[in-house]
Structures are given as C-alpha cells and as structure tokens.
Image (cartoon, rainbow, N blue to C red):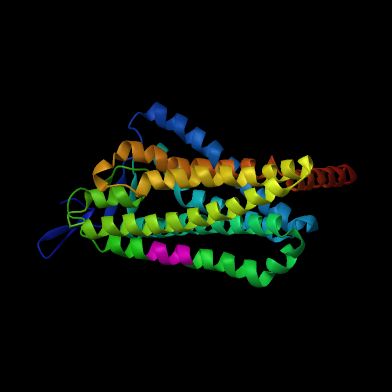
Amino acid sequence: MDPHMIHVRNVTEVTVFILTGFTDDFDLQVFLFFLFLAIYLFTLIGNLGLVVLVVGDIRLHIPMYYFLSVLSFLDACYSTVVTPKMLVNFLTKDKTISFLGCATQMLLFVTFGTTECFLLAAMAYDRYVAIYSPLLYSVTMSPRVYVPLITASYVGGILHAMVHTVATFSLSFCGSNEIKHVFCDIPPLLAISCADTHINQLLLFYLVGTIEVVTILIVLISYGFILLAILRMHSAEGRRKVFSTCGSHLTGVSIYHGTILFMYVRPSSSYALEHDMVVSILYTIVIPMLNPIIYSLRNRDVKEAMRKFAERNWFVTKVHF
C-alpha cells in the first residue's frame, strides 16, 4: 500500500502530494537551483530594501511610497511562499508536500496575488489624485483614505483565497497524487482530482475574471483622467515627470495582469500544464524580482533616497574603522 494514501469508505484518499517540477535531469535541476536562488535573493534584497528606504527616509513618507512599500512587502512574501520549497525540491529526491502544507501554500499565494491586484488598482487611483488634483493630494489621500484602501486589498485577497482553497481541498483526490507543477496551484490540482470540478472551474473563471475586470477598469479610468491632465499641461518638464512616474506603474500592471489573465481567465480545455508552469513562474517569482527595478530606477525620489542611504552607510563605515 502506498504510504501517501489512506482508505476512506473504500476510496483511496491522498494524504501527501508530489510536486514533479520541471525536469528529472539532475544537471538541469542544479542549474535551475542556482538560477532561482539568485532570483530569490535579488527579490528579497530589492523588495525589502525598498521597504527599509521608505520607512527610513522622511521624504518618502507620502501615500505613493507607502503603497510602494506594501507592494514590495507583498512581492517578498509572494516569492517566499513558492521559491524555498521549489529550491529544496531541485536538490532532493523527496519532492512531497503534505495535504495541509499544499493547502497552506495555495491559501497564501492566492492571498498575496489577489491583494497585489487590488493594490495596483489603489496605486493607480493614488496617481490619479496626485496628478489631477495635486493641491488637494495630501487631503484627499490622507491616512483615513490610504489605510482603508490597503486594508481592503488584504481583506479582499484573504477572502478570495479562502474561497478557492476550501473549494479545491474539499474535492476528492483518489487517483494520482503527482502535481505537474513546482507549487500547489489551482489548475494542476483540479487536473488530478477524481471529483467533478465543474463548479471549481466556474469559480476560478468568474471570480478571477471579475477581480481582473474591476481592477483593470479602475486602472484604465484612472489613467484616462491622468492622460487628460497631461494634455492640459503646458510644461514639457511636467509632462516628462508624469510619464516617468506613471510609466513604471503601467509597466508593472501590464505584465502582472497579462500573466494572470492568461493563467486563469480561459476555458479549462485550453490548459497546458507544462506551459502554464512557466507562466506561473513568471508572475510568482520573476515579476516580484522585476518590480523593484521597475519602480525604483525611473523614480528620482527613490534613487535619491538610495544615494543618501549609501553615503550615510559609507560614512558610518569610515568612522568605525
């Protein structure tokens, strides 16, 4: 009898899943281990570094950078939910994950992923207020506004994750326990369930679709008003500054939402697990690495804060020695 199965009412139920990953080629696994380890370290340093900058530099104590620091924290957590387990699996033969561990991983990564969708929409609204009504920005985006926006993003993410996690792990897994993925994503789990997953497929399509439509509409409407504000500007320098600030946000939004739409808002018959694995790696591991680059290299305030931080630490080091 398979030690990862138990008999319940004459049906064999899975108690442990196996994450099959990309490949069985050990040399390729070693290469992927070092590649994703480098990406993960860069992700942690970049995102947590931005959080430290925002907390430590008083010039960044405005809603725009509070949103950015929350996004960076989310990205660090998002990557941490998936990457460490994947790295371990690259170098070990035991690629199992417990039923509870799999459910926890799904709950967390859907929570952080959905929260990021809502947060990106809130950041678009913040940019609209800052550019369309700059004189009223500090009043309109007071703590009584941006704190509830951040809180609502987390609450929405948690509720959405709970629905999918409960719906998915209420299914029977009485066949194969091999998940053709590097983490416990929803489509590959539905693929190995021996129960009817029609309701789960509908939940996935309509809930993710609704969240995507609503958040993308908020972004598009906000940037529509921003475009009107830009067209009214007479200063070329002002236009350049607005494009620089908003361009980074639009880049991050486009990449993130594009991959989410591809992964979840399509008929289940079009799922190709091998291709989907690569795309899911993009939005859970690669995009969190890119966000610090996207949001900092084109932002004058962040670059200035980084320069001051580096100079201060260099001075402290010189004095110490």
Above or below, 242 against 278 in this view is below
User: Split into 4 quadrants, where in the image is the C terminus?
Assistant: top right
- What's the magenta region? 156-162
The outermost residue toward the top is: 27
Residue 47: in magenta span:
no
Q: Is residue 159 magenta?
A: yes
Residue at 57% x, 42% y: name it.
251
Principal secondary structure, stretch drawn in magenta: helix
Q: Position of residue 34 (x, y in %)?
A: 51, 33
Nearer-the-camera pick, 210 or 312: 210
Residue 266 falls left or right of residue 303:
left
Q: Is residue 312 left or right of residue 8?
A: right
Which residue is the extreme one toward the left? 10
Determine if residue 69 is in view: no
The residue sitting at 77% across, 40% down in the picture is: 236
Q: Nearer the viewer, residue 229 or 242?
A: 229
Q: Is residue 106 found left or right of 148 in the rendered image?
A: left
Indicate the position of residue 20 as horizontal and vertical percent values.
Answer: 31, 41
Where residue 126 sits in the image (x, y, percent)?
A: 64, 58
Residue lying at 63% horizontally and 40% vertically, measured from the top left? 293
